[in-house]
Image (tube, grey):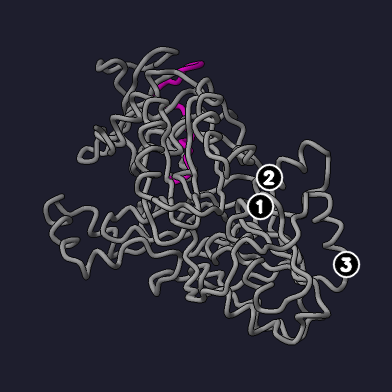
Amino acid sequence: MQLYNTLSAEERAIMIDDAGKQRLTLSFYAYAQISNPTQFRNDLFLAWNPLGVLGRIYVAHEGINAQLSLPADHFYEFKDTIEKYDFMKGIRLNIAVEHDDHSFLKLTVKVRDKIVADGLDDETFDATNIGIHLKAKEFNDLLNDPNVVVVDMRNHYESEIGHFTQAIRPDVDTFRESLPIIEEQLAEHKQDKKLLMYCTGGIRCEKASAYFKHKGFENVYQLEGGIIEYTRQVKAEGLESKFIGKNFVFDHRLGERITDDIVSQCHQCGKPCDAHTNCANEGCHLLFIQCEECAQSLEGCCSTECVSIIHMPEEEQKAIRRGIKNGNKIFKKGKSDVLTFKNNQDPLAAVPNLSDLVQSKTVAKKEAKIKKQYIGKGTHFFPKPSIGQFLIEENEIKVGDTVLIKGSTTGEQKLIIEKMFVNDIESEKAVSGDTCTFKIPFRIRLSDKIYKVLE
């Protein structure tokens, strides 16, 4: 009985491309009493694997938290698999604002102690005694109430690229850190202020609202469905988006564009930028914000030290990464001494003076858009010769053209094609249906798109 993945991410990406099916990216959660999480986990894997479901799912005694993608033509079959459980009948599925067929490349269903790590050890805490849910219009209306305190329940690396304009944003790395900080800073206002919270999809606010009610806050509200559902309702109802910038997401896209506002800066030079990336050094993998110029000069790395490491032979790189101590350094989130410019602040420092909570809207506008024409997508990267392979799906490119390669991790990289091979033969031009390769000074991913820059 297969209860685990047998294909690599690269093999799965090729299968997705060959299938040619549109995929949906979605998320959902439910708090419930699950007596046997391991059996529940196994049942889900066996039901979802044949449907082509891929994603990251956590189950625990307290419920389920899921972010996943699946072929669009299997959507209703998928719904049937979850609605067989009473606690998931009629559950809201948060459909992503932007879709990417490669948003997930593995199906991972893990049993955890909790679906949202909260650091709480209190048997009297009732996670189902939640605050009042608000839809997008109600949320917008309440933002105008002078007695409202808006709190972003996400982590610092999420809120720095996008947030509601009036929100205070705790400078925390984890959800569990934010609960006692907010409680302490707002302790004197449990009765006279309305606590209004939001997060990505609603799951963290669900638990936070119950926590703050448990701690004596009388007026607790949360954005139903989080930023994802808020954005859908804003578009459907023609509302003004009070959320500006990008919504951070936990698949390889790392963000969905909500508005054109750029509210963050490159962590290396300070230029307006909201493109998250992971350091190209696999032994570092630091998550940080990097502009196009810094990505090119530092080859996608967070520091010159990491640049030197990625040019070492692969075996030497693996030797550096070996050991638990070294492994524990991986997957840091935007905080490192090597980043020469950081845009991290502590908005909660001003919470006792509530009149100062409404932050000024300092937003850097996007630079003029590059005129471009879609050409195709990346299909392979050969690291030693630093060559990218692309499938031409539309139009054509030729030697001498300036192209733009774009991806959530790659960012936006421009270069001039000086020499290329088309279907393994050196050629001056590639047209629709051709596979072409040419040298590039950076790593590409399978989901990257290639465009021809127009004059």
Q: Real-space Cα distance between discs 1 and 2? A: 6 Å
**Residue 402 visible in image:** no
Given contact means CB atoms under 8 Å apart, are the residues at marks 1 and 2 in contact? yes
Percent from the top left, x then y, of residue 108?
36, 43
Give residue 182's mark.
Answer: none
Quick one: 100 or 282, which is closer to the camera? Answer: 100
Q: Residue at x 40, y 31 (%)?
A: 47
**How many numbered dots are placed on residues in this image?**
3
Q: Which residue is mark 2?
A: 229
Query: Which mark, residue 226?
Result: 1
As measured in the structure, the alpha-carbon distance from the residue carrying label 3 to the one carrying label 1 is 20 Å
**Mark 2: few/some/many CA within 10 Å (<14, 14-19, 20+):** many
Q: Tell me which label, 3 or 1, sits earlier in the chain.
A: 3
List the single residue furthest toward the front: 35
Q: Amino acid at mark 2?
A: Glu
Look at the picture and state if 290 lies above or below 386.
below
**SS category of the residue bearing label 2:** helix
Q: Nearer the viewer, residue 387 or 58?
A: 58
Residue 3: quadrant of the picture:
top left
Residue under pointer 3: 145
| Residue type marked 3 | Asp
Amino acid at pointer 1: Gly
The C terminus lies in quadrant: top right
Per the rendered image, the range of residues in magenta is 393-409
